[in-house]
Image: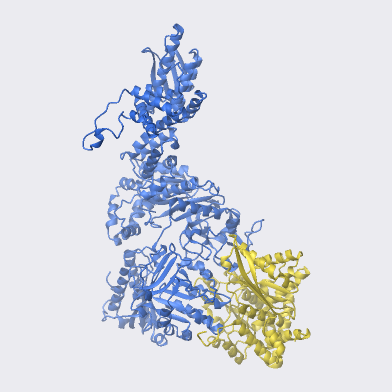
Amino acid sequence: MSTAVKPFSSFEMAQSQFDHVAEVLDLDEGACDLLRNPLREFSFAIPTRMDDGTIKIFRGFRVQHNDARGPSKGGLRFHPMETLDMVRALAMWMTWKCAVVDIPLGGGKGGVVCDPHNLSLGEQERICRGFVRQMGRNMGPALDVPAPDVMTSAQHMLWMLDEFEAIHGSHQPGFITGKPVGIGGSQGRTEATGYGVMFTVREALRDLDIRIEGTSASFQGFGNVSQYAVRLYREMGGTPVCVSCWDQRDGTSYAYTKRSGIDVDELLTVTDRFGGINRPEAERLGYKVLPGDDWISQDVDILVPAALENQVTAENVLRVGPRVKVIAEGANGPTSPEADRVIHERGIYMIPDLLANAGGVTCSYFEQVQSNMNFYWDKDEVLGKLDAKMTSAYMSVSDLARKRGIYMREAAYLIAVDRVVRACRDRGWV
Amino acid sequence: MGNPDQPLDSILASLKERAKELACLYRIDELVGNAGALDADVFEQVVRAIPPGWQFPGICEARLTVGLDRYSTDRFNRAVATMSSPVEVENEPVGTVAVAYTEPCPESDEGPFLKEERRLIDAVAQRIGHAILRARILTTGPHLGGAPGAGDTPPHSWEVLIDFLRRTDRELLGRINRRMANHLCWSGVPSASDLLGHVPMSQGPENGDENRPAQRRRFSSEDELTRRTFALAAEHLNDTEIIACIQTWLNEEKSLFLIQTLENPDSGLAETAEALKRFRSSGVVEGDLPAAMQTTLRVALVRRYFVDQPEFINIAKDHIAISDLYEVVDRLVHPTASHGKIGGKGAGLVLAHRILRDNAGSSGLLADLRVPKTWYVASDGLLAFIHYNNLEEVYNHKYMEIERVRQEYPHIIQVFKNSQFPPEMRKGLSAALDDLPPGPIIVRSSSLLEDRSGASFAGKYKSLFLANQGTKAERLAALEDAIAEIYASVFGPDPIEYRIERGLLHFSEEMGILIQEVVGRRAGDYFFPSFAGVAFSSNEFRWSPRIKREDGLIRMVPGLGTRAVDRTGDDYPVLVSPGQPTLRVSTSARDIVRYAPRKVDVIDLERRAFSTVEAATLLRGCGDDYPGARRLISIVQPDHVSLPSALGPNWETDDFVITFEGVLSQTPFMKQMREMLGVLREGLGTDVDIEFAHDGEHLYLVQCRAQSRSTEYAPAAIPRDIPHNRLLFSASRHISNGRVPNITHIVYVDPEAYANLGSYRELKDVAHAVGRLNSLLPKRQFILLGPGRWGSRGDIKLGVSVTYSDISNAAMLLEIARASGSYVPELSFGTHFFQDMVEAGIRYLPLYPDEPPGMLNETFLKSSRNILPSLVPEHQDLGATVRVIDVQAETGGNILRVLMNADLEEAVGFLARPERDETSVQEAAWIETGSQEEHWRWRLQMAERIAARIDAPAFGIKQLYLIGSVKNATAGPGSDIDLLVHDAGDAEQRSRLRLWLDGVSLALAEINYLRTGYETEGLLDPHYVTDEDIANKTSFAAKIGAVTDAARRLTLGRNSALDPPARPGPA
């Protein structure tokens, strides 16, 4: 290494985060050692016949970080140069996430080193099947449950499921999640994350003794998460006044505001599939168009960053309006550590990503439950159960935060880690 | 030979088609020779045997009069033209043989009859005379001897032929005899040389002296010679061989007239067409002619009808048969006395179709390939049109100043459109409309210069779509209007400039026209093909290392192919490589949707116009009528896209996107395209560029030409003598063709430093910094050089996580694959924004510096001054990772030039003197007018004049600066002048200033339009900055006194306050 600085490592970052929590919880060395590293790691070759008849060997990984609370759960990605480092970090993140919403699942993650741009669908199918042939004995509804991730889709999941069921000679739709509705998928999947965010916001407002009817909110992004969050927020009586989105044509982002409240259905008529709003059309509908970054400086009670990571930064956090009382992190890691400190100091109520956007993984859990029962709920039932889960998860975190007088982000981590440690301890592992 | 009659019979039977008159004669011989008595029955049969010997047997009738008896075929009395010959017995007329046509036929030697037919009818009359004589003799007294040639069976079957010729055409017999002698001699028969003048060629003393005329030799009696020749032939050849020889020579004799007509410079299209028609009806099959004659005819025809180029003829002669011309001739509209051709585009299409037909055999994939029905207007139709309307004055146009050409062009269009077509052309066009299937047509130019290698004229002349609806008169008027417009385009400024540039100005620019049916069907109010596009046999845009150049590239769109031909800013065609049909550009559902075509070009039959509609609207409205629509789309599911179910999509409710997935994976389309590109490349000996269309059932080839090699994508010559210290990088894997000539800035992300960045935030900041640089550095004049995969998502250590908008102004993207241990990382090939890069013309190159001969001059990159801190101060802490190098400042005025040659699999980037006449990557797509120098110099001059003349105090102007392309000396013909106005005026002053500059801007735009043909709303692009902006270095103010690409200060003149608004500067 030519420089003194240590290269960035996602896993080391996740470990140091854990170390901090471990210190607060005063965990013993055994628990720390167990949880700082994955429980199991698999690395294996997937020989695959290519379309031209040659054989190519692909590298597969699966990390099961911890399954004390239940079968490991986590995505399977196709990525060139996938590294164990990244996969380990993500597997650990999954353990905490499942624990914070208190679903009986552990954390896992996996991937195949490949670039789907260089592969035909047939080759991708053979890689999926090869993955299951290698890992099948270590996975299953009661062991480890994969899901779609970067560059993998429902189609990949179905190929894997089919191979798994062929090996076992029985139907086991609970082996995998992310399946289309009708072939073992769950209703409510698209709504889950956005609704989940709003369930926690609703509870937060109740805690803060603020009537939702009198509030207004600004959202960054207008994708799946935002669209459903805005919809539910409005249904609950709030007034969404601003959404921002990326404008592909102009190569910049814009914020669209309407003081009287955004009507999602109306706005969706001028929105493309990626949540890109047609600017001239929106103007025609009476929306005011502002620079994209202005979503953060709106005079509102609630901010929902639901687009990308690292959006609330040291630079723009000062623009957060004086009226803002709640920030709910719909995206993963939208707040930089520096900005987080500012928010904490200002006493704005933060609903951290670990908790706020856990609606997605909760719904995956419901999918698995339904698959195992081979009985599928209607959408209202799914969303009702989601509400219950999210609400009780929120309660635990906010109770702890209140009791200990700590920041919500920290409380969420503490609860998650504590639940996992307890499970390990109950099992006599540590 | 078992039965000598048998082969003769069969040969004569086949002769029936080829030498009909012989068959006719033989039949008559048979009838009158074999019959015991000459009764009415025999004569009835004789008259029926006569018509098949004539050119148009279908309308041919015959009548025989013997004494008072008449025998005739059924409709002889409807004759419109007759010929007859007396039947004589011992020189006394006893009757007549008459032949008649019942319908008018083209004029020939004797009325509608050929001179051969005169001989035939005479021979028939003679035969009948002989037969009557013999019958008389037989009845009066036997054994008095037979008539010559009748009665005794010849010992050899071919002797019938020889005998016939002896009696009918001694001249022809002589030539056949000579040929047989030659044939024998050539076949190595020793004594045959005696037949050729009795003296062996090598012996005669006269042969040794080239200055003395050769002595004339008298041939011995022709009959004697013939007897000897054929006696010798009989010794060495069997009957079949001899008859085959005679047949071939007879065919050749019969086809000579065609060569005579084609090679006669006086004969025009009308004459050659007539000759072809005659050849066609002669029944001679091309394959029966000797090879040399076939070639002669083919070459003559190709030259006559297609183009003159030796390269084209050389290939065409192997594929285009004489019979292929029949169709062309039948559909050729031309003025009287025309000597025109059908031009390059038409010829290219006919040739391509023939090559494909000749090679369609093995796989059967191309058996169903079609070419749209096409009519042609001969190239000199333009001249006739001009002459007919007394418009000769336009010929002077091409020698006028280009400004004048441009000024007068709109006028010429109107004059042409208001002119009349000569009546014969009008008639031809009307016939074309009747013959073409009802429905839209496209009128294309097919100039003689167009599509020549090196002068593609791509897009220089017009192609016009016509809805072809309404009454015949309306349709004809629209067609004439379109042709007139295309004729006028010959005198348009763009083609003339292009010709000046290519040194083609003085060629006579005749212009052929193609009138083609538009492939497609009607759905709703619209007419369009299911899908269409362009395909290239060489792929210069590969999105995966698994794709090879020869795998080819297809750009396909729904509806008319116009959107695939041009790059459209707002839409994407689907790109596929027929050699790697399973590797798609977009693999994630999101990318598939993002890069899907959204618009469709169609012909609106109601409005009778070409128009563009939204694909979704069109499919929702008439998806069930849209040909093959099911195969064009995929259904978008929340997490993936899939083919529609067998019950078909519900056009109303389903969320669909155009992917062509069904076409690609469920039809043989990709195999057909691959086969087609391969066969054409092989056949034409060059990479090809074709246009195709598909109507849902059949694939159509619409156009074919050599893959245009604009300098932008031509293989660049790689210099061998680049000094080592000036070489920045070299590469030898996955190279495309092309050049990126004038790079002024390099953005280098150091792979090692990037890998060692300590935090996620710093990694993200690198992307931000690149995005900032993208907006600051001069467009298309900088390259991005970085580790691994540009645009990485997820694990961003693999490469800088930019989006397309962060790199949109770069000229080129380079990825460095540094080996770590034995492991070389996979590069992205720009996949994250591949289609955006293709449409914007941003080039891509992978570098493998650890694999010789690949190299990367890190010393230069790391030791040059890094101007990042001064450009993007907020990211100066990234200085060790992101290095921005001002190449000119660093190397004393040099620039970086990148040359790529895929044929050699080599690419280099090296420091060199700038080439002023070359254009930046994007602008190279345009055909430039004159040198680049001129454009920026003129703009600079104009900017200086403005500064000199503007009443600065009155407008409150403190200073004027120049920025952008004019300042950088890179302005092209379409560039505007970026002025930076530092003003301190009040609102009123500012609004007056805007008004004044607007006026100047419009005036300059008009002058620029006349100079270059680029239409702009205005030529000035003023940016206003205030003292405050300058103090804060915000937006454009940052350019004033900037470290790189600084604004250039213009000298303000002394106040000419008298009338500033009226004097925008000299024109």
From the viewer's perspective, tell me whether residue A182 is left or right of residue A296. Answer: right
From the viewer's perspective, tell me whether residue A226 is left or right of residue B329. Answer: right
Q: Which of B191 and A351 is in front in this view?
A: B191
The image shows a total of numbered marks equal to: 0
Q: At which x and y percent is residue B985? A: 36, 84
Examine the rendering and report whether any part of residue A188 can be seen. yes
Which residue is found at the position 30% from the left and 71% from the top? B938
Q: Which chain is blue?
A: B
Q: Which of B1049 and B805 is in front in this view?
A: B805
Residue B471, compared with residue B976, is above or below; it is above
From the viewer's perspective, tell me whether residue B599 is left or right of residue A208. Answer: left
Residue B313, compared with residue B138, is above or below; it is below
Q: Quadrant of the C terminus of chain A?
A: bottom right
Q: At which x and y percent is residue A179? A: 69, 68
Q: Return the residue found at the far left.
A: B211
Q: Which of B464 and B242 is in front in this view?
A: B242
Residue B984, compared with residue B703, is above or below; it is below
Residue B241, compared with residue A358, is above or below; it is above
Q: Return the residue found at the far top.
A: B140
Q: How is the image coloured?
A: by chain
Q: The yellow chain is which one?
A: A
- Quadrant for residue B174, please give it: top left
- Quadrant for residue B923, please give it: bottom left
From the viewer's perspective, tell me whether residue B431 is left or right of residue B510. Answer: right
Q: At which x and y percent is residue B721? A: 35, 69
Examine the rendering and report whether any part of residue A206 can be seen. no
Q: At which x and y percent is residue B720? A: 37, 68
